[in-house]
Amino acid sequence: MHLLEVRGLGIRNPETGTEWILKDVGFEVGEGEFVTIMGPSGSGKTTLLHLCAGLESPSEGSVFLAGKDLAAMKDRDRTLLRRKWIGFVFQFFHLLPDLTVRENLELPLRLQGEDPAVHEGRIEEILDALELGDLRDRQPHGLSGGEMQRASIARALAGRPPLVLADEPTGNLASRAGEETMRLFREVHRRFGTSILLVTHNPRDAAFGDRVLFLFDGRLDPAHALEGPDLDAASVFARLEELGI
Ligand SMILES: Nc1ncnc2c1ncn2[C@@H]1O[C@H](COP(=O)(O)OP(=O)(O)O)[C@@H](O)[C@H]1O
Ligand SMILES: [Mg+2]
């Protein structure tokens, strides 16, 4: 079973009702995979992640999360499935300003009705993996962008979801902090075995994945994917050139 399977997915622009934002998109993310989707601004990346998480409904096609067809589920069940299986990382962090780093991390657990004290060991391990030990009692406003993103990755991992969806996580960071953040995604992937689906417009970030898919004009052709030992930033740039993106 794939953790995430997307088949023939399409969604129309809700304003015009005719133009397609995404059309016939299909791919899957297997257990323990780190997949990136490279796409220019406006290509439909955020919309695609929202569809994958069941936050929006497609006009056609299906999303299977943990083998379950999202469209066939009641809203409540879909929300519970999402909370259990998915952690989200956003471009603009979305940390709660009045909570400390540690309290932000504990929040998803509380939402799942769990007592963070029971998960002390896990929280410590995550703080350690994301190099947040010294920042745990600080509030987000005192942190740099890179530190805020580290805290939000930690939060995404707190409920130990099998899959993390990341929407341009370096989009609001300077290049050095961006690279550091991508390195931490790889570390999280290695250390916790978390599957990752990360969308980006940055070819260097895309090259951190084990497999790179290309999205443009709302289309994603699996035949354009890159993977294997030769995958690096140069090969991503070359493929973009080839595709005229
Ligand atoms: N709710 C909406 N109403 C109208 N147009 C939308 C809506 N959401 C997205 N779009 C359009 O769909 C396209 C893809 O948007 P988006 O998924 O945000 O792309 P990306 O994240 O790759 O920049 C854009 O042209 C955007 O203007
Ligand atoms: Mg976007």
Image (cartoon, grey):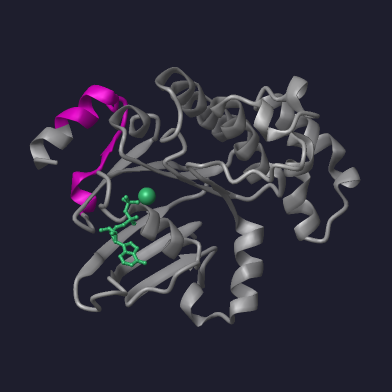
**Quarter of the picture for ligand 1?**
bottom left
Residue at (48%, 74%) from the top-left corner? 69
Residue at (19%, 55%) from the top-left corner? 217
Residue 174, image x, y percentages: 43, 23
Judge by depth and name the residue closer to the eye, 80 or 7. 80
Q: Determine the residue located farthest toward the right in the rendered image.
A: 117
Magenta stretch contains residue 235: yes
Residue 125 higher or lower than 221, as above or below: above
Residue at (84%, 35%) from the top-left corner? 121
Which contiguous range is marked in magenta?
Answer: 221-238
Q: Give the left or right position of residue 201, taking residue 29 as reference.
A: left
Residue 40, image x, y percentages: 25, 44
Residue 63, quarter of the rendered image: bottom left
Residue 196, image x, y percentages: 49, 43
Residue 75, quarter of the rendered image: bottom right
Q: Give the left or right position of residue 116, taking residue 38 as reference.
A: right
Residue 30, image x, y percentages: 46, 50
Count of labels in the image: 0
Q: Give the left or right position of residue 99, taking residue 227 as reference.
A: right
Magenta stretch contains residue 116: no
Residue at (66%, 68%) from the top-left corner? 80
Q: Quadrant of the C terminus?
A: top left
